Image: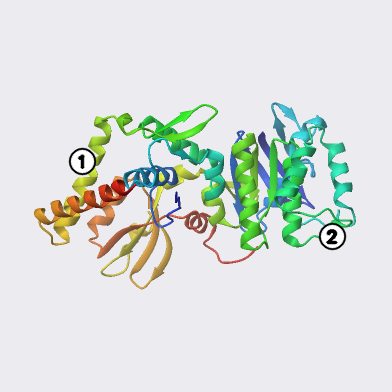
Amino acid sequence: MFFHIDTKSNAPLYEQIIQQVKEMCAKGLLTPDERLPSVRELSSHMVINPNTVSKAYQELERQGIIVTVRGRGTFISKKTDRTSDPGRLKAIRESLKEAVIENYYAGYSKKELIKLLEEVYEEMEGKTDEN
Amino acid sequence: MKISGLSKTIHGKHILSDINFSIETGSIIGVTGRNGAGKTTLLRTMTGILDPTKGDVTIDGYSIFKKPQTKEQVIFVPDSSEAFKNYSTKEILTLYKNIYSKFDEEYFYGLMDRFSLPFVKKTGAYSKGMKALFSLIIAFSTGAKYILLDEPTDGLDVIVKKQVLQILVEEVAAKDVSIIISSHRLDELEFMANKIIMIKDGKVDSLYEIEEMKEMYKKVQLVFKEAMPQNLKKEVTILDQTGRVYTVIMDRNDPKLQHMIEETDPLLFEELPLLLEDIFVAKLGGVSNVS
């Protein structure tokens, strides 16, 4: 597991943690039922405010990515626990829109962007299969 | 813990004037300000080492000046202490055990062991890093709910510094204590503190929740065809200017200002990551004198 603070990012720290957990799940670096560090462990490791870690974990739990078992710790959910959330779909749509605009100004075509998206999928899935 | 209307005058000089804020449990609060702004005096008054000229410090409604038992819930760790250098580790332990009735001896030995601190005949023999760790170990063993630290990482090497900061964070996570740190190391406070209090000329200049701060302001780089228009200069805080390139702090949620900048048709208008340091310079900088 690798958590880090991106000081160049404007995203709040708790969002960075959320993003990093999601990315590690998608890449297969974190697998279902795997235990995450406790709030105390992770805040100590990153040397950050424990409330920031709590906030990130609460949000990850709300999104169904992790589950907290009392007295045992925090774990990555089983894949089946992934729920569709219309609110998040809207947010994904917004970030896709940004990517489409970026792509246009960078001088690439729609086809090239779709190809890129497929490549990213392959990259993620490829790594999942290996694990 | 509540600080209300706290003022302190020393030799006719107003060091602190009308300081108000409160501290919730389980939080880390950074107190920062220019040299000589009154940070140390504030911490010393909050622990009852100094009597305030006016105002009060209360814990759960009890004044620490009127009800001395309340002080058991507070401990102050100064940036350097010479007072105990001729005492042994054991003697200091006995001293604190007698002062703080909730002193956790087992916890104390546990931490001494974890950081491999030896028991010595004279604590003056500890190195600077060991002294810093030792004062923190004592402080966290007292069972005090409010721990006030004056420049806890000043002069420590990176490894000891990380250890010091890690115990701080772990204490807050595990025991719901509150930590008040005075520091110039804004890069350290940035991710550790949830609240920042900036002191200027003995007054609270600003008080931020760190996350709120990033929602309130943004840092941008602006390049104009010529100089920055005068009317715009009044609306933003200029951090830096090199020729036609300006780095400014501006209100994040002001569509009018956003529009105003776009109207000037800048060559570049780009957001940069905002650091606590930028807010410090914007709020407390300006004149480059040292007081």
Q: Identify the image quadrant of the C terminus of chain B.
A: bottom right
- Please provide percent x and percent y for residue B28: 59, 42
Assess disc 2: are there few (<14), some (14-19) or many (≥20) residues with their C-alpha within 10 Å of its C-alpha. some
- The residue depicted at 74 percent of the width and 39 percent of the height is B107
Provide the chain ID for the residue under circle 2: B
Looking at the rendered structure, the secondary structure element under dot 2 is helix
- Please provide percent x and percent y for residue B289: 60, 66
Residue B207 visible to the viewer: no
Residue pushed farthest bottom?
B243
Residue pushed farthest front?
A130
The answer to which image quadrant residue A113 occupies is bottom left
- The residue depicted at 84 percent of the width and 60 percent of the height is B124
Q: Which residue is mark 2?
A: B124
Who is closer to the viewer here, A108 or A40? Answer: A40
What's the image's color scheme? rainbow
- The residue depicted at 27 percent of the width and 63 percent of the height is B268
Assess disc 1: are there few (<14), some (14-19) or many (≥20) residues with their C-alpha within 10 Å of its C-alpha. few
The answer to which image quadrant residue B63 occupies is top right
Provide the chain ID for the residue under circle 1: A
Residue B160 visible to the viewer: yes
Task: Report the amino acid beneath label 2.
Answer: Gly
Instruction: For marks 1 and 2, give the CA distance.
Output: 63 Å
Looking at the image, is B152 positioned above or below residue B72?
A: below
Looking at the rendered structure, the secondary structure element under dot 1 is helix
Q: Identify the image quadrant of the N terminus of chain B.
A: top right
Q: Which residue is mark 1?
A: A93
Task: Report the amino acid beneath label 1.
Answer: Arg
Cβ atoms at labels 1 and 2 below 8 Å apart? no
- Please provide percent x and percent y for residue B214: 43, 47
- Please provide percent x and percent y for residue A31: 38, 41
The answer to which image quadrant residue A78 occupies is top left
